[in-house]
Amino acid sequence: DARVTQTPRHKVTEMGQEVTMRCQPILGHNTVFWYRQTMMQGLELLAYFRNRAPLDDSGMPKDRFSAEMPDATLATLKIQPSEPRDSAVYFCASGLGTGVSNQPQHFGDGTRLSIL
Amino acid sequence: QQQVKQSPQSLIVQKGGISIINCAYENTAFDYFPWYQQFPGKGPALLIAIRPDVSEKKEGRFTISFNKSAKQFSLHIMDSQPGDSATYFCAAGDQGGKLIFGQGTELSVKP
């Protein structure tokens, strides 16, 4: 059963440290999304890529967050420097995007991030 | 215009009853309306989805009702079971592939 894999599942670190979260999309999927989930804001789209090119990162704080796809099997989300307000669950999702119609997104189980 | 409003925030239903969750949107450019189910410690999982050219879609005990003129859609869970206890999210998507999620409904089905 194909699934999106996220690592690490949990991360606890101190304020100011760099945090890197990784995502392996489902093989063959060409679109990768990064979401952040908090109790207050719910599920927010941070950024997404199609065919490894960034399409929209308007939901991401640009000064400290960066997202990349070094290759088709790996997406990364980095926070540098991290702050306590970044504590959340970060989800990666992948799908087969055509650019002309919306397609199902399949989510990983997330990285639970705590910044002390 | 990008918001999706979901209600209720929480819902308690007896086993065998019908659970109903409602969502409303503003942006008429949305053309894809999925529902996701999320269990604690897991990512959201796609449950059922509808496009605006149909008014209803049924898959097993789950039904989406869609009212294009009112810009509203709802999820009905028939014969609700304790295993259905989870958080449910509606979402609306545009042709670019983005999804805007509702705030979620925490469903508890009592035995």
Image (tube, coloured by chain):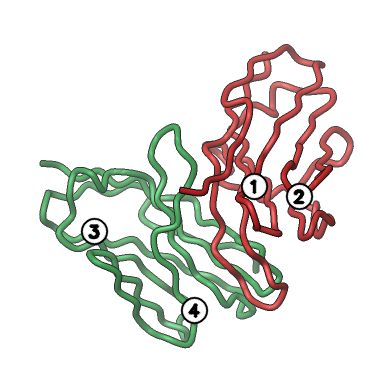
Q: Residues within 10 Å of mark 1 (few under 14, many from 20)?
A: many
* Relative to B63, A101 lies left or right: right
Q: Which residue lies under the disc numbered 2?
A: A72
Q: Residue at x 63, y 19 (%)?
A: A11
Question: Which of label 1 and label 3 is nearer to you?
Answer: 1
- Check disc 3 and report the residue beneath it: B19
Tell me the subunit letter for badge 2: A
Q: Is residue A101 above or below residue A106?
A: below
Nearer to us of marks 3 and 2 is 2
Tell me which residue sits at (45%, 37%) in the image. B42
Tell me the colour chain B is drawn in. green
- At label 2, counting other C-alpha atoms closer than 10 Å, the crowd grade (few under 14, some 14-19, many 20 or more) is some
Q: Residues within 10 Å of mark 3 (few under 14, many from 20)?
A: many
Q: Position of residue B106 (x, y in %)?
A: 35, 45
Whether pointer 1 and pointer 2 mark residues with C-beta atoms closer than 8 Å, the reply is yes
Q: In the figure, what tint was chain A given?
A: red
Query: Residue at the spot x=34%, y=80% of the render?
Result: B56
Give residue A25's mark: 1
Q: Which residue, given by chain and number where applicable, does mark 4 sit on?
A: B51
